[in-house]
Amino acid sequence: MKNICKFYFLLLLVFLTSFTKKNVLTVRSPNKQIEATIEVSDDAVHYSIKYKNTPFIKPSNLGFEFTGVKALNKNLEVIGFENSNSNTTWSQVWGENKEILDNYNQLKVELQEKDGLKRKMNIIFKVYDDGIGFRYEIPKQQNIDNISITKELTEFNFIKNHTAWYIPANFDSYEMLYKKAPISDVISANTPITFETTDGFFASIHEANLTNYADMTLLKSENNSFSFQCNLVPWPDGVKVKTKAPMETPWRTIQITDKASELVESNLILNLNEPNKLEDTSWIEPMKYIGIWWGMHIGTQTWTLGERHGANTFNTKKYIDFASKHNIKGVLTEGWNTGWENWGKKDAFDFVTPYEDFNLKEIAEYAKLKNVSYIGHVETGGAAESFQENFDKIFSMYHDLGVKTVKTGYAGGIQTKGQFHHGQFMVNHYDAVVKSAAKYHIMIDAHEPIKATGIRRTYPNMMTREGARGMEWNGWSSGNPPDHHTILPFTRGLGGPLDYTPGIFDVLYKNAKNRVKWNDLDDGTSRVNTTIAKQLALFVVLYSPLQMASDLIENYENQPAFKFIEDLGVDWEVSKVVNGKIGDYITVVRKDKLNGNWFLGSITNENERDLKIPLTFLEKDTNYRAEIYADGENTNWRTNPQEIEISQKEVNSKGVLDIKLAAGGGQAIRFVPIK
């Protein structure tokens, strides 16, 4: 037996050192449908991908350029390789699904320069049934200590001109509307970028475990209209990443599925992050919340002190009372602390001093008395360094008050000269916020953040983040069009939880008195471009463990539709995408981890739509009461957005629901087991 093994090993060596001077190694997914190949020659290191034997990504460059030394991308040889696999299941602290399958085949390729410094570099491929992750490792070695990466040479060379949904690359913001275009028309893109291929399957490029590195954007290759190069967000001096050996990059991810809905169900990003590092997670609690927030965006209240100041003690107690009465766990107030009057100035905030009309200690105690969780707020105005210097002061203050959640914000440019929101400097800052908050048992909701790349698995107190054009844009601009919500789950949503803040009932602002225009984007036509039923459905479709019902509480009083929000679950046993077409419609169902209720959210773009929903997700041999919140017969997002019909019917897993979605509308359903 030993002689046979030795023979095959020698045969492999002959193959790897053949006269072509090219080493070729391949790894396939467990179901054999996805294949990744790495080729090492004197001139380059390439990878390529096939899906169901169809070439998808043709040979694409790998490697790095550095400051002061030659690039690490050619004149390399394979000095070793290792195959391994895993087929395990792990449990989330919270999430879309309680149990996550982690099943992959792995190939680790060890490379070394043939001459010169003899530098070493490893490339690791993990291939799942729903996609691929690959990363670089530069191990500790005699010839490398400090590393200054000026360019990551990773390419994505598509063979065909697929259709893409994307936002143009931006080093400071992801708050843009998505574009749909052929790859040949895409000049640059933030990730995730999602594709419908000419071969009929779907794919998305993103990254996982973005740690101590710069955000990856994509830039069109000069010599190939179907190809993108990795373009990292730079430091002020132009260097992209500053680190030391040993180092490893984030995973470059390519999700690949037959259906668009399967992209949304994929756990690839989570699986490529490290397991939970927090020993005690008992204090981490998904929840619904309300807050003093929307009034500032529509111009009926102000963040600053004055006669229209929203975050005062009296108003906040009203919100706490409402939350306590209506099964809402949290209350947020923005504008409670001094500094908003100095907006735009350096270090405008000290983060801890309340305005004179807001008693923070009294509010925290009142919330506790009402069994409501008060949510802290730290707006930095881009003063990240000042915030970081005061972590202990800020988080210890909140901890002592019994506050377990803090919303952070970085509106405006980063005040540290030359730094971008998405560069390595800020990636490390966002990471430090989460780790510091964890020491004080505080959960984080980050706005103007670095994009979601699955860090929530490792630090599950990183609950949710903005990182998209959210609800606030409807308050002071032309707003988000009806198809925006039908694109988000297939693009931004693939990265992780989104704090979109749905739940506006007064979509035309009829009850908003004395509105004041406060920015140049407000042309006086602002409104929410959906129906009320769609606002309810968004709570299910757009996943977040912290879900904000964002309207003014007076718009919820005596409104029967608010019962759906009262009953809504926030932590899920299992989630499924029933159907979906990017930019057109999507239907999502989720099972409440606490009580076994199912919730359904279905939304459409500007077109009305009839859908048939098989109820096979429901448990067999159980009848359910379906509580249905639907668009009315005459509902239309433009002309009659607030008409909603509420009804009930008995259903079971053998049935099929016919649901009608109005133009710009949706439908939300709670399924309660009948015992």
Image (cartoon, rainbow, N blue to C red):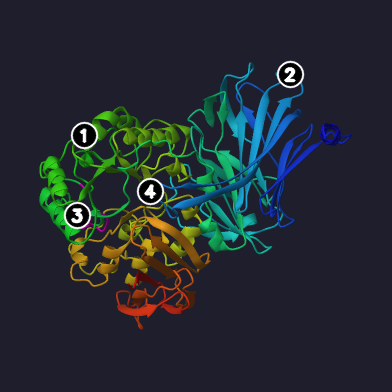
Q: Residue at x 26, y 42 (%)?
A: 404
Query: Relative to residue 458, is residue 381 drawn left or right?
Result: left
Rounded to the nearest whole Å, what is the CA distance between mark 3 and mark 4? 26 Å
Q: Is residue 472 placed above or below 533 in the rendered structure?
A: above
Query: Relative to residue 551, is residue 454 drawn left or right?
Result: right
Looking at the rendering, which quadrant does residue 31 occupy? bottom right
In the rendered structure, which amino acid carries the disc numbered 2? Gly
| Residue 519 in sight in this render | yes
Q: Is residue 49 placed above or below 590 in the rendered structure?
A: above
Task: Tell me which label, 1 or 4, sits earlier in the chain.
Answer: 1
In the rendered structure, which amino acid carries the disc numbered 1? Met
| Residue range (magenta) | 295-303
What residue did someone put label 2 on? 116
Task: Tell me which label, 4 or 2, sits earlier in the chain.
Answer: 2
In the rendered structure, which amino acid carries the disc numbered 4? Thr
Query: Relative to residue 187, is residue 371 drawn left or right?
Result: left
What residue did someone put label 3 on? 301
